[in-house]
Amino acid sequence: MKTLTPKFIPVYHSLLKEWYGLVEACIIWYIDFFQKENEWFSCTNEELSEILKVSERTIATAIKNLNEKWDVVISKKMREWGWILRNIQLAENCTLQNAKFALSKVSNLHSHNIIQEEKKSKKEKADVHGIDELVEAYREDERINEAFLEEDIIEWLKFKRWRKEYYATTKSFLQQMIVIKRMITNGKPQLDIPKRFNFAVNNAIGYGWKWIHRDDNTERQYLASKKDLFKTPNQDE
């Protein structure tokens, strides 16, 4: 049977950056090409040698390397007259995004780092306009826009961004603000809610807390320092 001779064989340059040899990259593409329409890729080392114009030993070494990298799955089937048919397929987990062919698994740690970097990048991109969007939501929500000063909202959002902690949605941000409003007032009507929120924000930032805290001790601190922190009308005169 005459070996199929392609007019050209494309090679994705990204594979070469992942420590693939040129022959390995060509074999991966060639297998991927066959698998689109055929169940079996049964080219022998001799046939691949003729296609790529390299020695059979080079082909054998390249296939061995791909197998050790978990990029291909090799199976064999006994045929009539006692000869064995070899089948090579790309592993299911070896698909390059937007290109459909294999990449090596460098290590579990490397993969983990890539995932973490992607998550970090997505969060940072999502936060580019995050503060403006959340402040706008605050302005439109009467439950909190009459209780908290805008400058304190912005200060808290900047602190959260500095900690690389982000509100998942506008809805979750508003919900947290409503919970904080109830918390700093102990669930009772209060006339000094803006001052309480200002104190709570500064306290959280000062102690480096992840969230705004409010307990009996915080309440005592607030009441004790209220005269020193906030001017009375008489003091403004």
Image (cartoon, rainbow, N blue to C red):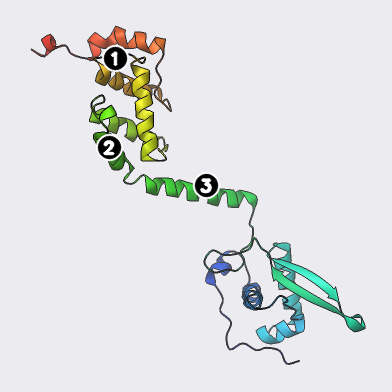
Residue situated furthest bottom in the rendering: 2
Identify the image quadrant of residue 29. Answer: bottom right
Residue 51 located left or right of residue 16: right
Q: Residues within 10 Å of mark 1 (few under 14, many from 20)?
A: few
Identify the mark nearer the N-term, 3 or 1.
3
What residue would you read off at disc 2? 135
Give the vertical position of 211 relative to 44 (above or below): above
- Label 2 sits on a secondary structure element that is helix
Residue under label 1, please give it.
189
Asked if marks 3 and 1 touch (Cβ < 8 Å), the reply is no
| Disc 1 residue type (three-letter) | Pro
Is 49 drawn above or below residue 234 in the view shown? below
Q: Determine the secondary structure under disc 3.
A: helix
Task: Return the residue at label 3.
Answer: 116
Residue 148: x and y, percent?
26, 25
How far is the residue under mark 2 from the one under mark 1?
24 Å
Q: Amino acid at mark 3?
A: Gln
What's under tag 2, amino acid-wise?
Val
Residue at 66% across / 75% down in the picture?
Answer: 35
Query: In the picture, residue 61 is in which quadrant?
Result: bottom right
Determine the CA span between mark 3 and mark 1. 44 Å
